Image: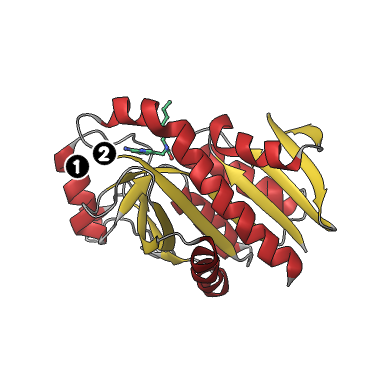
Amino acid sequence: MKIAIMGAMPEEVAPILEKLGEYSTIEYAGNKYYEATYKGVELVIAYSKIGKVFSTLTATTMIEHFGATKLLFSGVAGAISPELKVGDLIVATKLSQHDLDITAFGHPFGYVPEGAVFVEADEAMIAMSKEVATEMGKTIREGIIATGDQFVANEERKNWIGKEFGADALEMEGGSVAVVCDALSVPFFILRAISDAADMDASFSFDEFLETSAVESAEFVMKMVDRLVAA
Ligand code: 4EZ
């Protein structure tokens, strides 16, 4: 077993590297990858840079080049569901690409031939996350995450994504990481802590809460890793 832990931004992986303390740095394909042995299990950690293309490259590299056999994503997201507040954790049950559009040919949003609107995350890790939440005394919500190459700061766009995909949160990497892991048969887990409400105040809220929410997510993901290495 080799576990990949990825984020999109430096702030999203910094708390994980801090917890590990010692790691080696490898430069590959325009990014830095960090390798460590944690409680006897090999880890590879990286932030991809923002968006579907960079996250696709990083997830693929972690699996194909570094040999990761499980992948956990930690980061922040914009809330769609009004029940999700800043700092709250959401685990993706399934993910979609909200900006994928060949509807001109009669296909649904998020769909291309031989693909699927939704990609499902690993059920075993979702179940494990419930146990971890109970153990930590935290509430986590399961839901649908919609991904696209847009920072959504617009109520109308947010509501459309919520309606069209039944999505509870949105971000810019989960859906592409899901496609990669699904295609390569690598179980994956996508966790996000809310940083904003994807509305007109989103950029300010994001700037204010990126670090604290990233820490919330990272701490939870490391508890997941603790379980995985103990199993
Ligand atoms: C993308 N990430 C945001 C990157 C923002 C600014 C320099 C998560 C996210 C997000 N994505 C948090 N809130 C969001 C929102 N409202 N729309 C899209 O994964 C980079």
Near mark 1 (Cα within 10 A), the count class, few <14, some 14-19 or many ≥20, is few
* Quadrant including the N terminus: bottom right
Identified by mark 1, the residue type is Arg
Q: Name the residue under label 1.
A: 157
Q: In this view, does 179 lie to the left or right of 17?
A: left
Residue shown at 34% from the left, 35% from the top = 150
Residue lying furthest left in this view? 156
Near mark 2 (Cα within 10 A), the count class, few <14, some 14-19 or many ≥20, is many
Alpha carbon distance from label 1 to label 2: 9 Å
Q: In this view, does 16 lie to the left or right of 130?
A: right
Q: Are marks 1 and 2 in contact (CB under 8 Å)?
A: yes
Label 2 CB sits under 8 Å from any ligand 1 atom = yes
> What kind of element bears circle 2?
loop
Q: Nearer the viewer, residue 122 or 63?
A: 122
Q: Which of 116 and 19 is in front in this view?
A: 19
Is 231 situated above or below 57?
A: below
Give the numbered dot on residue 147: none
Residue 14 drawn at (x, y percent): 62, 34
The earlier-in-sequence mark between 1 and 2 is: 1
Residue shown at 22% from the left, 54% from the top = 162
Identified by mark 2, the residue type is Ala
Q: Report which quarter residue 90 is drawn in.
A: bottom left
Residue 165 drawn at (x, y percent): 26, 59
Q: Which of 35 and 228 is in front in this view?
A: 228
Is 147 situated above or below 68?
A: above
Give the numbered dot on residue 198: 2
Residue shown at 74% from the left, 64% from the top = 229
Disc nearest the viewer among 1 and 2: 2
Residue 97 drawn at (x, y percent): 37, 52
